[in-house]
């Protein structure tokens, strides 16, 4: 909503400078998004009168215009506008003034020029050249009484407030509504516009027409006025200027009046050419199946039975509350007008406007909810202007179909409630003056109650707390003294899954992985690349009804694709190691219910190792780099898992480990299958791990239990074992570490190949023998070692290769 | 005795030649160790006549003492020389260190953590909720019925699921639905922060993203008023933007609160005078708030005459952008390491 302060001052005295007023309104909930000063740029431009229009000697379409500036100089300039005429009041710019270039839209300094051989020392300006609109074809015609020689800034300059209007305030889409806000903020009175007009003594509107509301649920009131002997034509300049200031285009006097009154009051109006209404009457009803209407924007629209229409005796002539029809549109030939001022159901208007994809000034107001009382006030105001400006004769009275009068909104507010919500005890006087400044009625019923009547333009006020907000915003939010929360603090509760997820995040970062955040929407094809068909069948990805793009049509059931995409994008730029992770949800659909949202952590590792100087080397990161990172993550998070060889969709067999928390699988680690990697434009080894946070919970050591440290020396012996290559190293390590007197076993070499027999490999361990109670003797160590070797031979078929010590 | 003299001179020559720890240790073991030359001499004393034994014994002991002293001196010399050599061959300490991978939290996570920490200090606990929601929790329960103009500000992603012929499952457009879920499950006093993702059907540009992270706040108890709202949110904003940063509350509309407020901090660049970065307003909006609407208090089954509360919502990206001076919201989910490594 654009509010011209010049216009606004017709309803309310403006006692504050614009910037200060804007600030006050903004704090009170009427957000002034922008203050536009119109006319500051017009240095040197003034009002002129066209004295003479002569043909250009060298160009058919150009003319030589001589203007009067109320001074000795009467410059002659070249002008190409078709509408220039002798006697007009125009805006004239001498050379040196700044104008907005008609082609580029840039502000430039007007230079003296020769146009087709004729000197032109200035310019008669169009709206575009003044920065008023994009109209560059015609010159701007000023009102007849515009004072010649006056700086244009003084005559036409204005300050505009661009308002951001909240959905609950239709009144802020009107000059009067804003005037009431100004009144309350600056303690001044609102001057309501005049609505008294002369009526014909004999013909009454009720004789000329009738209104039938068939669907009373969607139309609470319909007022029709008849104006005869209308003289169609352009509106007076002042009215055109008002509309332009509000960003609307003048059309003709009748349409302009309906728009003007809508801007003034917030009530949308419509004027029909009465002679084009079949049967000369109005029927408000739902459209019938198959009915169509051509709207004013020249689109032929099919109507559904949900659409409320304004019909004549035969057919729809307008879509109620949204747009009029072309058929009964006023035209230069129109002489009788039927003025509509009605109240339509906000939900119905909104649904219709959404269904037709047609948002209009009218629908924007109706959908916020208007009061039927407003329709009457606006109708009388428009009738007055039609009589005075369009030269019409008003038939007596208005046809007022108002099936069920809506009562005034009365709300009881207690002082206790005001104090309870605001924490401030307002005095009776404060309450009463704040409300009456806003146009509310307020009756004090001692000891504690106020009976408040909301004015008809305030449809947003319906309950006590609505009134409390009025009091808060008029007295000022800044006047409410802050006070810290008192009272009991609820006992803290921590969700174990969310807590572990956050610990995994910290652990991953500490291990060197960079966190990323990716979108949860993807495509079925992308998911198919990383998730097995049976998983997608068990939980078909949730599909959007209205995706923004085909790339974002379903909810992901796996994070893997997003991470691989992100890795690929970064590896195109990065030369070096890249390790990324995301902790986010996957969405597993369930029949007839919301999906299960599971917290998952996925990491991806790729690229090459960095050298001494951080420079990329030729060595690619491999499985054990990723495993090292994952082990570090799990260690830091306090989770004990077992890695077992296994298989997983999209990962290379033989290079995949499953993570087990007890007997439940909690995740996977592996090298991405080259086929899958290629799908994401990745080449070379790419490693990926995935942890299901909830499944990892059983692996969590709640509190690490301390193990005592031995005070006695350890004896270290190296043991090399020949084992079948199918025996996992983890089992050998586990067997050694769990043997008697072994404090620690560290694998330090793995070897296969000649001279070892095929199918065998050698694992070399440094084994620490140590006791908590005493220093071990050589004999004890030798005995423990013997038992250990025997156990390994027995359990794992291992064979001692001989001591390396 | 001549033997002893020869031994002494040989030992001192060799000691002078020892120039590192290993050489010193070898020398010491050769001359002063348990099998060393001096001990050998002393061991042979028993075979000698008494007079000779006395003279030679005294000489051997003196030699041992002398060698010990010489050793100590030489050891100090060697240590000094080693340190001097290290100092002489100094390194350029500004060369880069040997570094492993350095990981960081995403700036959105960092900011969200800071926000939750500021709230935690005021006794707010964290409760997350589902991102895929029912229309009821996302809209109706929050007083945004179908065809309400407030739905315009939250264009919605709908799922193709239908219940009773109607679409009813959506991606939550804000974290507010979890307020309702939390109140349905808990009795007052309530003091909770709801972080999480939300989604809006919105074209992406420098200031708009279709995926957003929010932190929502809810406090419900007896005696909670706008005064508490202002104090809590001021403390919260100042924890994020600095102790002395002015915080402003202005009237605004959200269907689920009444009275409603917008929270803004003073523009840090112009100090409130108005500049380009604050759109000439002098203030930067950081969130919305208000007293929980009475109907919502009633609908979750609380006694609305007894309990009042306030709610507030903040965009995490907005806070992060203001704190770090990030000019384009699209950076966050582009996940370009060159961006992420800055935080």
Image (cartoon, coloured by chain):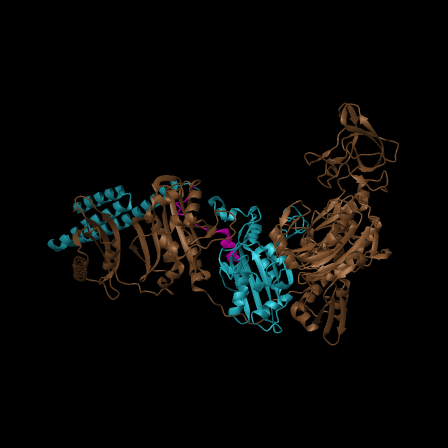
Chain colours: A brown, B cyan
Q: Main secondary structure of the magenta part?
A: loop
Q: Name the residue: 34% across, 54% down.
A: A668
As displayed, is residue A392 above or below residue A188?
Answer: above
Q: Indicate the position of residue A364 as horizontal and vertical percent values.
A: 67, 54
The answer, for residue B244, to whether it is visible in the render is: no
Viewer-nearest residue: B77 or A519: A519
Looking at the rendered structure, the number of numbered marks drawn on it comes to 0
Q: Is residue B240 left or right of residue A365?
A: left
B88 in relation to B271, above or below: above
Residue B144 in the image: state x and y as whole percent.
Answer: 60, 61
Q: Is residue B36 left or right of residue A679?
A: left
Residue A95 position (above or below residue A595):
above
Is residue B112 located in the magenta-colored stretch of the structure? Answer: yes
Q: Is residue A414 magenta?
A: no
Res. B200 in view: yes
Image location (x, y in percent) of residue A341: 74, 56
Place residue A218 in its image quadrant. bottom right
Residue A39 in the image: above or below residue B322? above
User: Observer-nearest residue: B334 or A467?
Assistant: A467
Considering every residue shown, the one lying at the far bottom of the view is: A447
Give the image quarter of residue A65. top right
Residue A24 point in image, percent of width and height: 72, 56
Which of the pair A732/A188 is nearer the observer? Answer: A188
- Image: magenta residue range: B95-114
């Amino acid at each position: 909503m654009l509010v011209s302060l010049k216009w606004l001052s017709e309803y309310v005295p403006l006692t504050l400078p614009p910037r200060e007023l804007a600030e006050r309104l903004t704090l009170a909930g009427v957000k002034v998004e922008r203050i536009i000063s119109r006319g500051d740029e017009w240095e040197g431009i003034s009002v002129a009168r066209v004295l003479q229009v002569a043909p250009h000697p060298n160009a058919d379409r150009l003319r030589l215009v001589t203007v009067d500036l109320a001074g000795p100089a009467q410059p002659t300039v070249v002008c190409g506008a078709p509408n220039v005429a002798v006697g007009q009041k125009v805006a004239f710019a001498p050379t040196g003034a700044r104008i907005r270039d008609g082609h580029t839209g840039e502000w430039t300094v007007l230079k003296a020029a020769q146009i087709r051989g004729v000197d032109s020392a200035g310019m008669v300006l169009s709206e575009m050249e003044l920065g008023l609109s994009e109209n560059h074809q015609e010159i701007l015609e000023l009102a007849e009484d515009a004072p010649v020689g006056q700086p244009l800034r003084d005559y036409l300059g204005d300050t505009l407030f661009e308002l951001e209007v909240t959905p609950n305030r239709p009144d802020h889409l009107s000059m009067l509504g804003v005037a009431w806000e100004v009144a309350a903020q600056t303690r001044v009175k609102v001057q309501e516009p005049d609505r008294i007009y002369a009526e014909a003594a004999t013909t009454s509107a009720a004789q000329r027409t009738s209104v039938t509301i068939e669907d009373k649920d969607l139309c609470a009131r319909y007022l029709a006025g008849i104006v005869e002997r209308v003289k169609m034509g352009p509106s007076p300049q002042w009215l055109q200027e008002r509309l332009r200031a509000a960003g609307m285009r003048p059309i003709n006097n009748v349409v302009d009046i309906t728009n003007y009154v809508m801007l003034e009051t917030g009530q949308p109006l419509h004027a029909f050419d009465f002679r084009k209404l079949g049967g000369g009457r109005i029927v408000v009803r739902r459209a019938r199946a198959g009915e169509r209407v051509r709207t004013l924007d020249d689109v032929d629209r099919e109507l559904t039975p949900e659409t409320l229409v304004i019909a004549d005796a035969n057919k729809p002539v307008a879509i109620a509350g949204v747009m009029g029809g072309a058929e009964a549109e006023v035209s230069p030939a129109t002489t009788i007008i039927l003025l509509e001022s009605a109240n339509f159901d906000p939900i119905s208007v909104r649904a219709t406007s959404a269904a037709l994809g047609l948002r209009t000034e009218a629908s924007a107001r109706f959908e916020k909810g208007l009061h039927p009382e407003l329709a009457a006030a606006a109708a009388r105001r428009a009738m007055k202007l039609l009589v005075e400006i369009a030269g019409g004769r008003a038939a007596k009275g208005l046809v007022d179909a108002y099936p069920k009068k809506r009562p005034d909104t009365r709300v009881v507010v207690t002082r206790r409630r005001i104090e309870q919500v605001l924490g401030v005890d307002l005095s009776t006087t404060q309450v009463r003056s704040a409300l009456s400044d806003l146009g509310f009625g307020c009756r004090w019923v001692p000891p504690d109650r106020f009976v408040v009547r909301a004015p008809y333009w305030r449809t947003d006020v319906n309950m006590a707390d609505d009134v409390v907000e009025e009091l808060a915003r008029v007295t000022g939010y800044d006047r409410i003294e802050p006070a810290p929360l008192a009272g009991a603090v609820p006992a803290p509760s921590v969700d174990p899954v969310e807590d572990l997820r956050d610990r995994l995040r910290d652990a991953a970062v500490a291990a060197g992985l960079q966190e990323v955040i990716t979108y949860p929407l993807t495509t079925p094809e992308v998911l198919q690349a990383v998730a097995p068909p049976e998983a997608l069948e068990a939980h078909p990805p949730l599909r959007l009804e209205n995706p923004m793009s085909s790339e974002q049509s379903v909810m992901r059931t796996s994070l893997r694709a997003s991470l691989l995409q992100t890795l690929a994008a970064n590896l195109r730029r990065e030369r070096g190691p890249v390790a990324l992770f995301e902790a986010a949800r996957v969405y597993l659909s369930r029949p007839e219910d919301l999906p299960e949202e599971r917290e998952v952590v996925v990491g991806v590792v790729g690229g090459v190792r960095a050298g001494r100087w951080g420079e990329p080397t030729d060595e690619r990161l491999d499985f054990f780099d990723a495993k090292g990172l994952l082990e570090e993550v799990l260690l830091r998070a306090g989770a004990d898992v077992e890695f077992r060889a296994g298989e997983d969709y999209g990962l290379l067999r033989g290079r995949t480990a499953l993570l087990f928390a007890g007997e439940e699988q909690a995740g996977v680690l592996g090298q991405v299958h080259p086929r899958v990697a290629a799908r994401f434009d990745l080449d070379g080894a790419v490693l990926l791990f995935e942890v299901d946070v909830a499944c990892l919970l059983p692996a969590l050591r709640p509190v690490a239990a301390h193990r005592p440290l031995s005070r006695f020396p350890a004896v270290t012996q190296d043991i090399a074992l020949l084992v079948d290559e199918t025996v996992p190293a983890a089992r050998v390590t586990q067997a050694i570490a769990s043997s008697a007197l072994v404090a620690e076993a560290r694998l330090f070499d793995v070897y296969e190949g000649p001279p070892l027999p095929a199918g065998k490999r050698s694992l070399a361990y440094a084994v620490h023998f140590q006791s908590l109670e005493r220093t071990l003797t050589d004999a004890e160590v030798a005995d423990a070692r013997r038992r250990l070797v025997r156990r390994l031979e027995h359990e794992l078929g291992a064979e001692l290769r001989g001591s390396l010590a | 005795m001549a033997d002893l003299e020869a031994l002494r001179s040989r030992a001192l020559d060799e000691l002078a030649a020892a120039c590192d720890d290993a050489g010193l240790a070898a020398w010491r073991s050769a001359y002063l160790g348990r099998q060393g030359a001096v001990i050998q001499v002393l061991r042979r004393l028993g075979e000698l006549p008494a007079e000779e034994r006395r003279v030679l014994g005294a000489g051997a002991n003196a030699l041992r003492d002398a060698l010990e002293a010489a050793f100590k001196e030489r050891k100090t010399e060697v240590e000094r020389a080693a340190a001097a050599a290290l100092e002489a061959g100094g390194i350029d300490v500004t060369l880069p260190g040997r570094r492993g991978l350095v990981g960081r939290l995403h700036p959105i996570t960092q900011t969200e953590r800071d926000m939750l920490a500021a709230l935690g200090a005021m006794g707010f606990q964290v409760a997350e909720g589902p991102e895929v929601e029912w229309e009821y929790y996302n809209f109706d329960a929050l007083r945004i019925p179908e065809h309400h103009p407030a739905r315009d500000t939250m264009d919605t992603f709908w799922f193709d699921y239908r219940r009773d012929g109607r679409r009813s499952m959506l991606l939550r457009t804000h974290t507010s639905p979890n307020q309702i879920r939390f109140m349905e499950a808990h009795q007052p006093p309530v003091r909770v922060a709801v972080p999480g993702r939300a989604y809006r059907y919105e074209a992406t540009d420098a200031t708009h993203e279709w995926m957003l992270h929010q932190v929502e706040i809810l406090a419900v108890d007896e005696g909670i008023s706008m005064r508490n709202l202002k104090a809590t949110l001021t403390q919260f904003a100042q924890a994020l933007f600095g102790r002395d940063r002015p915080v402003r509350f202005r009237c605004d509309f959200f269907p689920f609160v009444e009275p409603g407020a917008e929270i803004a901090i003073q523009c840090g660049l112009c100090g409130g005078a108005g500049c380009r970065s604050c759109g000439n307003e002098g203030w930067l909006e950081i969130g919305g708030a208000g007293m929980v609407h009475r109907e919502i208090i009633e609908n979750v089954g609380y006694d609305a005459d007894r309990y009042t509360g306030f709610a507030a919502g903040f965009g995490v990206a907005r806070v992060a952008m203001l704190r770090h001076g990030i000019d384009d919201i699209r950076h966050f989910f582009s996940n370009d390491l060159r961006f992420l490594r800055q935080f």
